Image: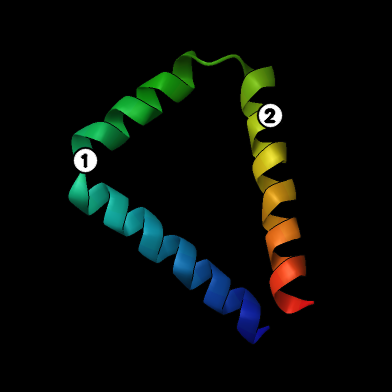
Amino acid sequence: MNELLTAIGLVLVLEGVLYAIAPGGMKNVMRSALETPDQTLRAAGLGAAVIGVFLVWIIRG
């Protein structure tokens, strides 16, 4: 459970830093995401999840 809360905290830190450093860029990213087809977003999300699981597996293994 500790690792899960740490991971969530790190995600919040990274997102917060991105919004603090480049709020305009983040708005553009959101606008772009709204215009991107659902299937493309789904594939990108799945790809990111697979890469994340692989990285955790490598680091923890």
- Give the left or right position of residue 29, taking residue 53 as reference: left
Q: Is residue 56 above or below residue 23?
A: below
- Give the left or right position of residue 43, taking residue 7 as reference: right
Q: How far is disc 2 from disc 1 in space, using C-alphas?
A: 24 Å
Residue 6 percent across, percent down from the top left: 54, 78
Residue 35 percent across, percent down from the top left: 47, 13
Residue 27 is drawn in which quadrant? top left
Q: Nearer the viewer, residue 31 or 14?
A: 14
Residue 52 is drawn in which quadrant? bottom right
Q: Is residue 16 above or below residue 40?
A: below
- Quadrant of the snapshot with the N terminus: bottom right
Residue at coordinates 60% horizontally, 14% vertically from top-left? 37
Mark 1 — residue?
A: 23
- Give the left or right position of residue 29, taking residue 20 as reference: right
Residue 52 circle label: none
- Give the left or right position of residue 5, taking residue 1 as reference: left
- Between discs 2 and 1, the one toward the N terminus: 1
Q: Is residue 6 above or below residue 24?
A: below
Residue 17 percent across, percent down from the top left: 28, 57
> Label 1 is placed on what type of residue?
Pro
Residue 43 is drawn in which quadrant? top right
How crowded is the residue under tag 2: few (<14 C-alpha within 10 Å), some, or many (20+)?
A: few
Residue at coordinates 39% horizontally, 59% vertically from top-left? 14
Instruction: Say which element carries label 1.
Output: helix
Q: Is residue 10 above or below residue 29?
A: below
> Label 2 is placed on what type of residue?
Arg
Residue at coordinates 53% horizontally, 16% vertically from top-left? 36
Residue at coordinates 69% horizontally, 50% vertically from top-left? 51
Q: Nearer the viewer, residue 55 or 41?
A: 55
Mark 2 — residue?
A: 42
